Image: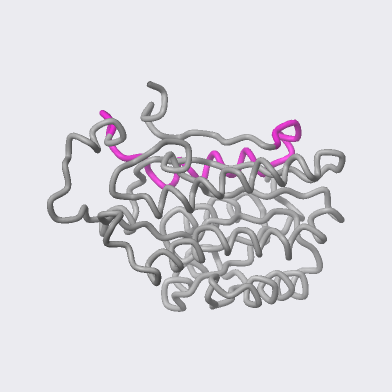
Amino acid sequence: MRYENKVVLVTGAGSGIGREIVLRLTSEGATVFGHDRDAERLAETSAMAGGIETRVGDVTSPEECKEAVAACVAAHGRLDVLGNVAGIARSEHFLDVTVEQYRQMMAVNTDAAFFFCQAAIPHLLETDGNIVNIASNAGVMGQAYTVAYCTSKGAVVQLTRALAMEFIKTKLRVNAIAPSGVNTNLIKGFQFPTGADFSLMQPYMGHRPLSEASEIAGLFAYIASDEARSMTGAIINVDNGVTAG
């Protein structure tokens, strides 16, 4: 019961890693506020978790990020942990990426994390709380055919480190988990572009099966708990050795 009397806001709570984090933390006593753009899936998560407070919204809106944090605090009186989990992934030839596609990638993966952090930190400072961002192995290595995605997740890595340093003299902690392939709907719908050179992708395809979302949730539960009080500014790879060599 590491999370008894703690309030956690999780974005992307409707499915995949976000859903597993909600289930793991509620099982450890957390009061979770779930956020997602998909009302139906978010309702499913809430039911699976025994009924949690939820909010449907678009994380690409800075105002929505601010209002979601305010709604969480209004509902539960405090905020102890922010989990920036919502994200999208796409593969394409770099020269084919449209302005709209680039803006969407950055808005969901990077801007949302930035503005949720900005809204949440004043409350987290009051509770000596912490932030866990979901980055990616794509944020710490170059990958062909995912330039926009790599850019967005690389920004999450640096957001994590920079925030950790700006608040290093407080008890606020900011960390990130960087998975590679995880067995979720996101990866199941992932398609490489026509004409892709698969030899370019071999270095980050890996040699082991996909991770499970529950594994990421288990690590999240540790990092965001008081057991990890000395951990801040860390980028934890969970990638089956993809970035090791």
Q: Could you tell whether 231 is left or right of 126 in the image? A: left
Residue 89 spot, x, y in % from top left: 37, 57
In this orientation, which residue lies closer to the viewer: 244 or 154?
A: 154
Instruction: Name, please, the residue furthest toward the front.
Output: 95
Q: Quadrant of the C terminus?
A: top left
- Residue drawn at x 72%, y 48% is 130
The part of the image, by quadrant, that contains residue 204 is: top left
- Residue drawn at x 77%, y 50% is 129
Residue 75 spot, x, y in % from top left: 74, 74
Scheme of image coloration: one colour
Residue 201 spot, x, y in % from top left: 24, 38
Q: How many marks?
A: 0
Check if residue 11 falls in the magenta segment: no
- Residue drawn at x 53%, y 49% is 134
Check if residue 209 falls in the magenta segment: yes
Q: Could you tell whether 156 is left or right of 211 in the image? A: right
- Compared to residue 140, the image places residue 65 above or below, namely below
Residue 28 spot, x, y in % from top left: 63, 49
Stretch in magenta = 206-232
Q: Could you tell whether 115 is left or right of 97 in the image? A: right
The part of the image, by quadrant, that contains residue 50 is: bottom right
Instruction: Name, please, the residue furthest toward the left.
Output: 195
Q: Quadrant of the N terminus?
A: top right
In this orientation, which residue lies closer to the viewer: 194 or 217?
A: 194
